[in-house]
RNA sequence: GGGCCUGUAGCUUAGCAUGGUGGAGCACUCGGCUGAUAACCGAGAGGUCCCCGGUUCGAAUCCGGGCUGGCCCA
């Protein structure tokens, strides 16, 4: 039995009910069970980081995942959908440090690594709980009860196996490199862990004195004075032109080496009063020019180094990365920059790095030993100024890297770290990218591809605590062992089965050295947290422990994440998987956008421009949020959040709800039984408009499906939305209202019910992956065949119900109706007052066919007595013909003369022109030459007749005759009365099916006697459910009201029977 | 500085591969409808199609250069 729905759309009332219903009835579990023999599909939930509450972007991400999983489930797929969480790493460490008021590693060590790590674990697990609840609230169906967690032992073992595998393939190495380094966290940072924003730094020009030449200087520019103590050489570009210029300030002469194009600028910066070019060089000519290290006295290391055989020390060298900026000469400290490091390698200079983990100068830093590097900037500048070698100093605002977690400006340090040799696998990775389907295409073909092309080796070691420990044990003899399986630890000391594999406990486990028999201890590093999620496609399957699962599922069928994952998870998975299996671990990728604020700015709590999913749900419900996120724009574009957008989604769902409410009201009243009154049973009772709606429905279904397959999520949902609003609500429901009002069993009414029923049910099926709550709600009432709509099969498109003909004709009818309503408005005759005649002057045969099919329907909609059709080619008397040029037709033939021809056309006699054109000799004189015009070049129109009102429609022009006769007037009054009586019924709060007694008292100012209205009495009675009806004074118990309609005064009295 | 993407009405967008007077929805104003009714329908107003050049009779669309915003990198 279909229940009558008389509540308004209140998602916050029924959405939690539906979620409770799913829980109580194990809807999710049963749906999965139903599909367990279906084709296997491996989906991976890119694990969100357990940092606390979810934001709008995370919500969008999960909703997209849920959409497709629900959609594919409705096609019978057996989908592996384990939720996942990324739980290690610096972000959590930093949060815990802040909570404990720590400021550096010493604080952690004092507190005890075990206590610290325990707190990190607790933080991660409690965040997971909060996040899971929030995801569930979004109606997202994933396997929440058994998520994969990167902190579990099986996961760690999987990581170790992967490292071992890399080691066996000789793809892991220990190397000394210059890396970005956070002086607060005291660890190396990956490129992915650095955030850039503007910072104001010193900007200084320094004169390096050329050796053995009085007053000759090489001028360099830098923003990091503190790197000057580590300066070993200066670089020029081999192909640039350089000059030696003579400059004079206050009568003193100096000679400066700078790039030719920048000479003037440098002279200006140095406030020199005169300058003159003495000599020109190619960059390459300057190689080997020797200078005096400007801080030689303060940093004794340099004098010591000069004693060694370092040929290129304190000389000019060549480098391609030098740009024509500032001076065109770059001071180079191989220990403090990746480029500098390369130059150092090329010129056999050591990566001298007098800076410790905390960013302080070591004793090699000489004068500044023990002091934080950056704090020495001003002192170094003062010193240079005192020595007279500071040419200019000022400030510059430029983009500078910061630690992604603690926001400390990064520094560059030379350290020894472990690397995965991703560069050796680059070709394979590129190949694999092209084997994968990317949506949109450029996300893979260009963006991901180019990123991998420029990849460097992956530094995987971190000098921290909360992470997967590096599985490498080292012996004093130099021997190293990489542990790939836990079994290998059983031979060692202090290992117990099922022990926590994290630091510090794992650090106590020692192994016997296979070479010297000594004791091997674990190197203290942990793995880069990006490595954790990189391996999740096999780690969550507990590979290598459980190989069958891997065989069954791997590789993954589909992933979707935001575009920042090009450098993140898309990349890390690819790298790790190619190293482990020579294969990309996913087959399809949908790259989605970011949720931004309405100004396209990143949402952030600190800027106060963030909108939380929670506050949106509170206002408009989950389905509205889901609808909005999925319909607003293409998934791969950034989404500027707009409250109006959510409101709009809510509005559409509200309209769907109203259609549902309308339908169930009458279905329940008539106890409509969809089992009995099937489509087949009623096949011969459908009206043309019913068949039209079926056709539109099938069209919407097929479009929606097609677009979803192409990941055009927005287009898919827009097709459904369009059907609901345009076809169902704004048109079909309007057409069908009279039919639902009929009392008793009418096959015509039942046919209408069937159409509404099918439309609502199919829309629910279509919508259920997008907005599962309202879909479930409607489904439960209308069908309830399964516990949940999710167990239904995805709608199959019934092509035999499609009819382009019906659609084309209805389009013409709708266009005519709209035109007539428009004309009525111009004439100020509202729809309740009938029109004597409507004339449609058509330009094709569509109108004729449309009126044959839908003429009656149209008459009702526009309230007209007769419709007259003027067929194509014929004219309607009284209509003047007009002629207009068509530029699209004229352009190709007449080119720049087109406008001239257009003006000639405007001056033609339309009737003659039309005749000429039909005979094929419509000509004009253009520049004295006669040219022929074709029918593509002109368009004929019809001018307004005086008495009638006209409006254009899709297939011509419509005219309405507004003359009012007494009969028409009576019909108008009847409709006006019906409307008032209905309003009074509602005021009395009568049920739809209640009967009444009605009396009408007329003043007879306009109407001449009640006989005028007599022919309409039955009509009034029928439409107002008046069992009794009479003219005359009110009775005492009548609910009475006075009305004025079109100048006539009425008193209407009704009472319930 | 580089790579990828983006820019159309106050807001959100369609159109762009294949050039021919730019379509919607929301919001706004006016009007209509009235047993889906805190809904619905119609009309109006609102556009330098980011800017500058080029190709073309004709450019939102094609080409070149710039700018904006996003992500990523240096």
Image (tube, coloured by chain):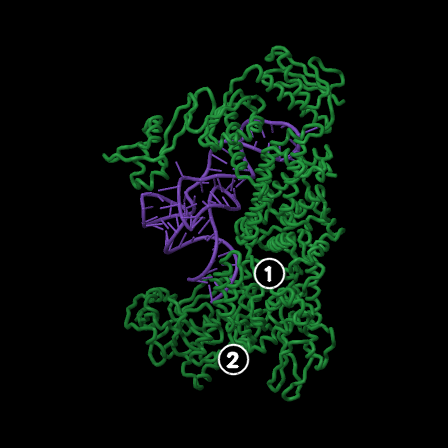
Chain colours: A green, B purple
Could you say which is closer to the camera, residue A389 or residue A883?
A: A883
Determine the residue positioned at 66% across, 51% down: A138
List x then y, in percent, for residue A893. 31, 40
Are the numbered discs 2 and 1 placed on the same chain, yes or no? Answer: yes
Q: Is residue A753 above or below residue A790?
A: above
Is residue A48 at least partly visible in the picture? no
Q: Which mark is residue A676?
A: none
Say whether marks 2 and 1 touch (CB < 8 Å). no
Q: Secondary structure at mark 1?
A: loop
List x then y, in percent, for residue A856. 57, 27
Could you say which is closer to the camera, residue A384 or residue A956?
A: A956
Q: Chain of mark 1?
A: A
Which of marks 1 and 2 precedes in the sequence? 2
Quarter that holds the N terminus of chain A: top right
Q: Is residue A647 above or below residue A268?
A: above
Quarter where residue A280 is shown: bottom left
Quarter where residue A578 is shown: bottom right
List x then y, in percent, for residue A913. 33, 29
Along the horizontal axis of the image, is A396 left or right of A661?
Answer: left
Along the horizontal axis of the image, is A661 left or right of B73?
Answer: right
List x then y, in percent, for residue A821. 53, 28
Q: Which residue is mark 1?
A: A557
Determine the residue positioned at 58% across, 40% down: A695
Q: Chain of mark 2?
A: A
Could you say which is closer to the camera, residue A37 or residue A404?
A: A37
Q: Secondary structure at mark 2?
A: helix
Query: Residue pushed farthest top?
Result: A1009
User: How far apart are the two marked residues, 2 and 1, measured between alpha carbons?
Assistant: 55 Å
Q: Which residue is mark 2?
A: A364
Along the horizontal axis of the image, is A513 left or right of A994?
Answer: left
Mark 2 packing: few (<14 Cα in 10 Å), some, or many (20+)? Answer: some
């Amino acid at each position: 039995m279909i229940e009558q729905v008389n509540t308004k759309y209140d998602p916050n009332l029924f959405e939690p009910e539906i979620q409770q219903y799913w829980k109580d009835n194990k809807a999710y579990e049963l749906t999965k069970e139903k599909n367990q023999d279906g084709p296997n599909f491996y989906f991976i939930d890119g694990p969100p980081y357990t940092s606390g509450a979810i934001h709008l972007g995370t919500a969008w991400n999960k909703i997209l995942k849920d959409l497709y999983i629900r959609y594919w489930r409705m096609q019978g797929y057996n989908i592996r959908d384990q939720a996942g969480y990324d739980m290690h790493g610096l972000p959590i460490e930093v949060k815990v440090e802040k909570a404990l008021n720590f400021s550096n590693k010493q604080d952690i060590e004092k507190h005890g690594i075990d206590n610290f790590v325990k707190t990190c674990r607790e933080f991660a697990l409690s965040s997971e709980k909060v996040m899971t609840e929030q995801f569930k609230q979004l109606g997202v169906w994933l396997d929440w009860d058994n998520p994969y967690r990167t902190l579990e032992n099986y996961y760690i073992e999987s990581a170790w196996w992967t490292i071992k595998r890399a080691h066996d393939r000789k793809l892991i190495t220990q190397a000394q490199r210059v890396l970005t380094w956070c002086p607060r966290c005291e660890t190396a940072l990956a490129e992915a862990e650095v955030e850039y924003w503007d910072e104001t730094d010193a900007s200084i020009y320094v004169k390096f004195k050329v050796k053995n030449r009085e007053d000759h200087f090489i001028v360099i520019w830098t923003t990091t004075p503190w790197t000057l103590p580590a300066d070993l050489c200066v670089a020029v570009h081999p192909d640039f032109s350089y000059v030696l210029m003579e400059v004079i300030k206050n009568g003193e002469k100096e000679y400066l080496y700078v790039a030719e194009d920048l000479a003037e600028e440098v002279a200006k910066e140095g406030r020199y009063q005169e300058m003159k070019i003495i000599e020109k060089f190619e960059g390459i000519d300057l190689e080997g020019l020797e200078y005096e290290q400007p801080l030689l006295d303060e940093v004794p290391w340099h004098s010591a180094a000069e004693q060694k055989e370092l040929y290129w020390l304190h000389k000019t060298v060549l480098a391609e990365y030098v740009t024509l900026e500032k001076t065109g000469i770059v001071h180079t400290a191989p220990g403090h920059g990746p480029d500098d490091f390369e130059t150092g390698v090329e010129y056999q200079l050591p990566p001298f790095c007098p800076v410790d983990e905390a960013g302080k100068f070591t004793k090699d830093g000489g004068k500044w030993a023990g002091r934080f590097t950056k704090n020495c900037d001003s002192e170094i500048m003062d010193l240079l100024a005192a020595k007279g070698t500071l040419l200019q100093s000022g400030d510059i605002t430029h983009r500078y890297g910061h630690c992604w977690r603690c926001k400390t400006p990064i520094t560059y340090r030379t350290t020894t770290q472990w690397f995965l040799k991703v560069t050796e696998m680059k070709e394979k990775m590129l190949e694999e990218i092209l084997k994968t389907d990317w949506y949109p295409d450029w996300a893979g073909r260009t963006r991901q591809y180019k990123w991998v092309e420029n990849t460097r080796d992956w530094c995987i070691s971190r000098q921290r605590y909360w992470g997967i420990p590096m599985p490498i044990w080292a012996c004093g003899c130099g021997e190293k062992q990489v542990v790939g399986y836990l079994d290998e630890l059983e031979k060692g000391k202090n290992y117990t089965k099922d022990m926590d594999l994290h630091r510090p406990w794992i650090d106590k486990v020692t192994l016997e050295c296979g070479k010297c028999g000594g004791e091997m201890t674990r190197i203290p590093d942990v793995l880069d947290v990006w490595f954790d999620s990189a391996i999740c496609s096999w780690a969550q399957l507990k590979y290598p422990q459980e190989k069958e699962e891997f065989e069954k599922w791997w590789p993954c069928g589909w992933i979707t994440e935001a575009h920042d994952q090009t450098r993140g998870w898309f990349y890390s998975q690819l790298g790790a998987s190619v190293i482990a299996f020579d294969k990309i671990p996913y087959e399809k990728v949908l790259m989605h956008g970011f949720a931004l604020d309405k100004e396209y700015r990143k949402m952030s709590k600190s800027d106060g421009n963030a909108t939380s999913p929670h506050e949106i749900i509170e206002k408009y419900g989950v389905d509205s949020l889901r609808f909005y996120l999925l319909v607003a724009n293409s998934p791969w574009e950034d989404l500027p959040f707009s409250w109006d957008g959510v409101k709009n989604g809510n509005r559409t769902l509200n309209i769907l709800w109203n259609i549902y409410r309308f339908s169930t009201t009458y279905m329940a009243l008539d106890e409509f039984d969809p089992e009995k009154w099937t489509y087949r049973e009623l096949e011969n009772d459908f009206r043309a408009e019913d068949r039209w709606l079926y056709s539109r429905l099938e069209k919407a279904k097929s479009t929606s499906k097609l677009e979803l397959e192409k990941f055009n999520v927005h287009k898919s949902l827009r097709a459904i939305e369009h059907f609901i609003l345009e076809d169902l609500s704004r048109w079909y429901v309007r057409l069908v209202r009279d039919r639902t009002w009929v009392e008793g069993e009418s096959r015509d009414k039942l046919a209408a019910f069937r159409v509404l029923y099918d439309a609502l049910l199919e829309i629910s099926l279509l919508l259920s992956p997008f907005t599962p709550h309202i879909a479930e709600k409607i489904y439960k009432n209308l069908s309830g065949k399964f516990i949940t709509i999710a167990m239904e099969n995805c709608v199959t498109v019934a092509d035999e119900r499609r009819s382009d003909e019906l659609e084309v004709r209805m389009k013409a009818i709708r266009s005519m109706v709209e035109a007539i309503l428009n004309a009525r408005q111009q004439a100020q005759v509202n729809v309740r007052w009938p029109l004597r005649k409507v004339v449609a002057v058509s330009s094709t045969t569509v109108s004729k066919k449309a009126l044959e099919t839908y003429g009656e329907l149209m008459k009702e909609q526009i309230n007209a007595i007769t419709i007259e059709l003027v067929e194509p080619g014929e004219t309607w008397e009284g209509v003047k013909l007009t002629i207009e040029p068509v530029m699209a037709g004229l352009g190709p033939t007449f080119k720049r003369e087109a406008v001239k021809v257009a003006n000639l056309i405007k001056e033609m006699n339309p009737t003659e022109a039309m005749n000429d054109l039909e005979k094929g000799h419509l000509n004009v004189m253009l520049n004295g030459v006669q040219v022929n015009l074709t029918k593509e070049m002109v368009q004929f129109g019809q001018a307004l007749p005086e008495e009638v009102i006209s409006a254009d429609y899709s297939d011509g022009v419509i005219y309405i005759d507004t003359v009012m006769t007494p009969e028409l007037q009576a019909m108008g009054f009847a409709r006006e009365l019906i409307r008032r009586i209905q309003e009074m019924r509602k005021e009395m709060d009568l049920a739809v099916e209640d009967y009444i007694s009605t009396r009408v008292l007329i003043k007879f100012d306009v109407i001449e006697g009640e006989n005028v209205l007599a022919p309409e009495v039955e009509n009034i009675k029928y439409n107002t459910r008046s069992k009794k009806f009479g003219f005359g004074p009110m009775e005492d118990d009548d609910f009475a009201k006075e009305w004025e309609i079109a100048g006539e005064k009425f008193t209407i009295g009704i009472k319930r029977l």
